[in-house]
Structure formats: structure tokens, C-alpha cells
Amino acid sequence: MMARPDKPSPGAAYSQGTLFIVSAPSGAGKTSLVKALLERDGDLHLAVSCTTRAARPGEIDGVHYHFLTEDEFQRRIDAGDFLEHAVVFGRRYGTTAAAVRDGLERGQDLLLEIDWQGARQVRTHWPDAVAIFIVPPSLAALEERLRGRAQDDDAVIAERMARACDEVSHYGEYDYLLVNDQFAAALAALSAVIVAERQRLVRQRGRLGPLLEALVPVRDGH
């Protein structure tokens, strides 16, 4: 059974960090965009997910993912550790509730790089999470990118292409929709979403309480 995290009261929630979700079909460039975004924005932190897939070249355990065996992953499911988990291309992926809750309570803005299944689960617990979906400019461009990675054979690429259409069909469940055609433009758009969401009145009111009280003193009778 999935863990249900302890939620802060509505007033307290906005004095804490903001949770961002980024999803995309495989090959849309999500991982590269997220990596560049994290390098540019020192106030944004990646909530590291768990997976049963093998590490790819250059990936570091505990930095890119927590790499678990099938048995380890199942034990964490049984213990109710996961905020969300799903099976993608035969491998399990999941994010622990503790990783998200602890980061937000420390005032960190967290980013979850997960698929639509995980995003739907997370938003049942954190409905105020900001969800962003990234699409490729065309199916032809998506296939070109998948082949350019030189990581999968034709059968796997065909499976990923078929799955991409199903994944994109869930774009309506997100708050923002970005097209990754030109990388620099897509990164700028993604960064703009993060910056704009931080300035929302409902978030700033909690974070800037002392400043607002000093600037707007309480008047008698008001």
C-alpha cells in the first residue's frame, strides 16, 4: 500500500518549498532539459527516484537514481515507502514520500522527473504541485532522437514510439505544456515557469510574511 504523506495545513504549506513535476515521452529531451535547469537554478533540487533498471553510462547511484534490485523495490512497496511508483518498459520506478516531504519541509523547491502515472499519484497527495509536460516537435523528430541515442534496437524503438502517443494523450492532466524543438528556447520556457510559479501570491504571502507585515502595518478597525 502506498504511503500517504503527512500534509501541512493550507496556511503552512506555502511557507515551504514548491513541488514541480516534469514528464515527457522517452526521447523528448526531458532529462537533458532537467539537467540544464538544475545547473542554472541553484535553488531547485532533484528529488532522486528509485528504479530497478540498470544504470546507464555516466549515471551515479544516489545522484541520478537510487538503483534497486526487484526484491529491494518490492520490500519498499510493502513497507509503504513510495509516494508514487509505476512500471515503465518493464522496469519499476518510484519516489519515496520521505524524500519529498523532508525536502519541502526544509523549504526546498523540489523537481520530480516522472511519467504521467507517477504524476497522477503525486497530485492526489500534493494537489498544489506544479506539473509540466514536454513534447517533441514531431513524431519524426522523436524517432530521430531515439535512434541518435544508439541505446536501443529497432524493436525497442518501435515500442517507445507506440508508447509515446499514449503518454502524450495525458497532457491535459498538466498545468503547462512545452515543445522541445530548439533546446535553448525550451530551457528558457521551462525556467520561466519555475520563476513565475515562485512569485504566485499564495506562495509569496507565506514566504514574505514578515516583510509584508512591515510594509503594510495593521490599521485600527481593519
Image (cartoon, rainbow, N blue to C red):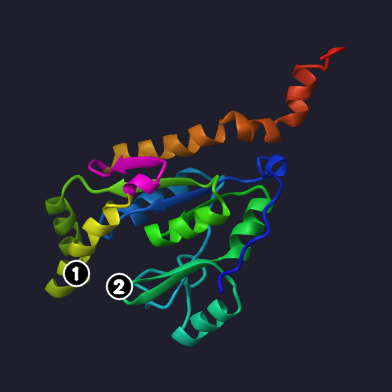
At 12% from the left and 52% from the top, the residue drawn is: 140
- Please name whichever residue, 60 or 200, is drawn nearer the observer in this view of the structure: 200
Give the residue type at disc 1.
Answer: Glu
Q: Can the viewer see residue 96 in this picture?
A: yes
Is residue 83 rendered magenta in the image?
A: no
Q: Position of residue 34 (x, y in %)?
A: 40, 51
- Point out the residue furthest to the top here: 220
Q: Position of residue 160 (x, y in %)?
A: 22, 65
Say which residue label 2 marks: 89
Disc 1 element: helix
- Point out the residue furthest to the bottom here: 71
At 67% from the left and 44% from the top, the residue drawn is: 13
Contact, mark 1 vs mark 2 (Cβ under 8 Å): yes
Say which residue label 1 marks: 159
**Over which residues does the magenta segment extend?**
171-182
Give the residue type at disc 2.
Answer: Phe
| Quadrant hosting residue 155 | bottom left
Q: Can the viewer see residue 115 in this picture?
A: no
| Quadrant hosting residue 81 | bottom right
Q: Where is residue 47 in the image (x, y as percent from the top left)?
A: 53, 59
Density class for disc 2 (Cα within 10 Å; few <14, some 14-19, many ≥20) is: few
